[in-house]
Structures are given as C-alpha cells and as structure tokens.
Amino acid sequence: MRALVVDDSAVMRKVLIGALGRANINEVDQAADGVEAVQAVQQNNYDIILMDWNMPNMLGIDALKAIREMGKTMPIIMVTTEAEKSRVLEALKAGATNYVIKPFEPNTIVGKIQEVLNKSKG
Amino acid sequence: MRAENINPFIESVYDLFTTMLNAKAERKNVGIAKTANPRDIMALIGISGRVRGMVALAFPVSTALAMVNKLLNSDIKIMDDTVSDAIAEMVNIVAGGAKARMNTGNEKPLDLSLPTVVRGGDFSVDYPTNSVWLEINFDSDLGPFTLRVTFEPEK
C-alpha cells in the first residue's frame, strides 16, 4: 500500500504519516501543496491520499478536482480546518471520499483511513 | 470587536488541546491590548470575508516546545523550523475552528490567510489605530500562552 500526504505543514505531514503507519501503511510520499500533489499523482500510483485544503500555489480542493479529472479513483480524505458544512459538501461533490476536520484525535484519522480502504477493497 | 466574537476562539483553543495535545487549557484573564508585546514565538493568521480580522497565538519557548513535543511525541530542545511550523499549524487550527463556529447559517465561509510566525523576544507588533485587540491569557498542562484576536471595527 502506498499513500500520499498533502499538507503545507511539515509537522502535520508527520502526524498524518504516523496515523498511516498505525493503519499499516508505511510507504508514504509527501507533497507540500496542490501542485506537488497533482504532479505526484501523475507520476505514481497511490492507494490513498490525505489532502489539506488551505495551501499555497494550489488549494487542496482544486488538487482534488484535478486528480478526479485525471480519472483517478483512489480514496481521498480531506484533512482540514475547513469545518463549515458548505465546505464539506463542496469537497464531497468534488469527489472526496471522506472528510476529517482538524483538530482530530489520533484514533479518528486512523479509523477513517481504515474505513475508506476497507470500502475501496469491497 | 464584540465580546461574543471571542468565544469561538476560546472554544477552539480548548478543542485543540483536548484532541491533538491530550492536555487541558484554562482561560485566565481577558483584556484589551493596544499593542502586542510578543513572547518568544508568535503565530498570526488573517481572516477575511464578511468580517476581517487577525488571530495570534503567542508562547514562551518552554510552552512552544512542550506543545510540539506532545504533538510529535518528540524531544526537541531548541527552537527550530519544526517548532515554527507546528505553531503556525496550531493558529491555523484555532482560527479554522473559530470561523466555523462563527458561521451560523448559510453564509459564505470566511477565508484564512496562510499563517506567519515571528520568533525572538525583542520586537513589538503595532496595530492600526482603530484596531482593538482582545487578549486572553491561558494556563495549560503544557505552560502559559496568550491568544489575541481583533476584527475590523464594524461600520
């Protein structure tokens, strides 16, 4: 299993990589903005992506749309401080598989990762 | 700035501590700050949209290190880019949670700027004449810190 973590905060990427490790995903690439994320997806195959919303150069929501327009269907979990209902709906409409609002408890994100992977296998 | 505008930020600080830091924070006194005399590290983030404002979190080094080490389960002893990055993310989380709480209906969500971090104790931050900053001091399991919030005067 290979994952991509997209967040402009290196610390948050570390936290999310830790969560992926707890879900037994240890091969993880990192991107610091939406542009890097889209480039990474063009070059590699991922089983799951964790995507922040507010980032420089390209927002996570725009990267999500770009990745879906490429025909990629891997689970993408938005992990963001954007907690308004309209934002959640916008992301789900754009193809997000799930949505986690920061701040989160460590078990919450691990559970969401396992949940979407189990669904994608089924 | 209306006093009720401060509550979403205080709640958001509590949320950050209980969820990601597994620690408790307790609000102390609230006051009005004309200028910010930052402690050793300060993270600021702008809010824009139907209201415009700024949120700042200021920490002594000891608190900043304790928070980052708790978050990452690490043992960082000096201020470095990791600490700055973590503090920036924390003000982002506090502002994000607060703006969601301030959204009471179908209003367009407020937007956040990218956070800025200032390090060092020998500087001051001055605010425009009409700005009123509310300053809330906190004590926590990880040490004291200060939250400052301002919104553009409503016309």
Image (cartoon, coloured by chain):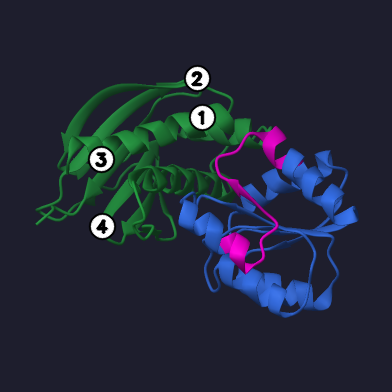
Chain letter of the residue beneath label 3 in the structure image? B
Query: Disc 4 marks which amino acid?
Result: Arg
Classify mark 4: residues with Cα within 10 Å, few (<14), some (14-19) or many (20+). Answer: some
Tell me whether the residue at label 3 lies in contact with that at label 2, contact meaning CB atoms closer than 8 angstroms: no
Tell me the SS state at disc 4: loop
Identify the residue position indicated by label 2 in the image: B141
Tell me whether the residue at label 1 lies in contact with that at label 2, contact meaning CB atoms closer than 8 angstroms: yes
Q: Earlier in the sequence, mark 3 or mark 2?
A: 3
Tell me the SS state at disc 2: loop
B93 falls in the magenta region:
no
Residue found 44% across the figure and 48% down from its top: B96
- Horizontally, is A76 left or right of A87 in the view? right
- The CA distance from mark 1 to mark 3 is 20 Å
- The CA distance from mark 1 to mark 2 is 9 Å
Identify the residue position indicated by label 1 in the image: B17
Q: Are marks 3 and 4 on the same chain?
A: yes
Classify mark 1: residues with Cα within 10 Å, few (<14), some (14-19) or many (20+). Answer: many
Query: Disc 2 marks which amino acid?
Result: Asp
Chain letter of the residue beneath label 1 in the structure image? B
Identify the residue position indicated by label 3 in the image: B5
In the image, the segment drawn in magenta is A91-110
Residue found 18% across the figure and 54% down from its top: B152
Tell me the SS state at disc 3: helix
Residue found 77% across the figure and 77% down from its top: A71
Chain letter matching colour blue: A
Identify the residue position indicated by label 4 in the image: B52
Query: Disc 3 marks which amino acid?
Result: Asn
Chain letter of the residue beneath label 4 in the structure image? B
Tell me the SS state at disc 1: helix
Which of the 4 image quarters holds residue B50?
A: bottom left
Report how many numbered discs are placed on residues in the image: 4
Locate the N terminus of chain A by quadrant.
bottom right
